[in-house]
Image: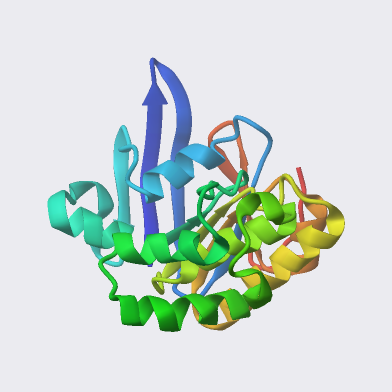
Amino acid sequence: MIYFEDVHKEYKGHKILDSINIAIEKGELVSIVGHSGAGKTSLIKLILAEEKPSKGKVSFQSKSIHGLSGNPLNEYRRKIGIVFQDFRLLPNKTAFENIAFAMEAAGKTDHDIKLDVPHVLDLVDLKDKMHNFPHELSGGEKQRVAIARAIVNRPEIIIADEPTGNLDPVNTYDIVQILKKINDLGTTVILTTHNKGVIDNLGKRVITMDKGKVIRDDKSGKYII
């Protein structure tokens, strides 16, 4: 699905990524781990086509991501849902409206919105909070709204960038279970995290980065740095 072929990234003469060769297949749940500055964020930005490699190629299926522009690039980005550490919810909109806004931006009809928003809120166990504003929700509930927003347009890939970084252990467990549920439904999930407990409990593939290089790639791994 996503392929990195001898990818290098430099910024102002500094190596950010060095000789990255990885393949993430459809339906995988992959955790990318490493200390701050290891290259995780740069890897994600290349997948999102926010940056271009200095050398090498990043492909989605058989197409170079960084050869896309205009409508093909927009179509590619619509295949990806993103979950951030800081939620990024609109404070003046309810949980329902935050998710509906993402559907409106994708050109979905009012009929689709009325059907799909309650469905995804139910999937993240938050249907009873659909009319609550962000300030009325806990941190864990905000992140569940953010996940619902990310999946409502049925993307092929979910990128969860430190999604549990601001959460306590109980909410962290709940968020991980939801991501596993989404993956079980067939969506590819790419997770970046510093949380050793999350990685060790998942028992899924772990890519470990250090100083811009992939130093481990374990099919069923643990957090080892």
- Compared across the picture, whether 208 is left or right of 96 comes to right
The quarter of the picture where residue 29 lies is bottom right
Q: Tell me which colouring the rendered structure shows.
A: rainbow
Depth check: give the residue in front, 121 or 186. Answer: 121
Q: Is residue 159 above or below residue 45?
A: below
How many numbered circles are shown?
0
Residue located farthest toward the right when viewing the structure as drawn: 169
Residue 199 point in image, percent of width and height: 74, 58
Residue located farthest toward the left when viewing the structure as drawn: 70
Residue 215 showing in the rendered view: yes
The quarter of the picture where residue 55 lies is top left
The quarter of the picture where residue 103 lies is bottom left
Task: Please name the residue shown 54% across and 36% down the image.
Answer: 39
Residue 33 point in image, percent of width and height: 65, 47
Depth check: give the residue in front, 215 or 36. Answer: 36
Q: Is residue 18 above or below residue 163?
A: above
Task: Please name the residue shown 31% across and 32% down the image.
Answer: 54
- Compared across the picture, whether 76 is left or right of 202 comes to left
Q: In what quadrant of the picture does the C terminus appear?
A: top right
Residue 60 showing in the rendered view: no
Depth check: give the residue in front, 131 or 173. Answer: 131
Task: Please name the residue shown 47% across and 38% down the image.
Answer: 42
Task: Please name the residue shown 54% across and 50% down the image.
Answer: 89
Residue 216 point in image, percent of width and height: 64, 50
Q: In what quadrant of the picture does the N terminus appear?
A: bottom left
Residue 104 point in image, percent of width and height: 32, 64
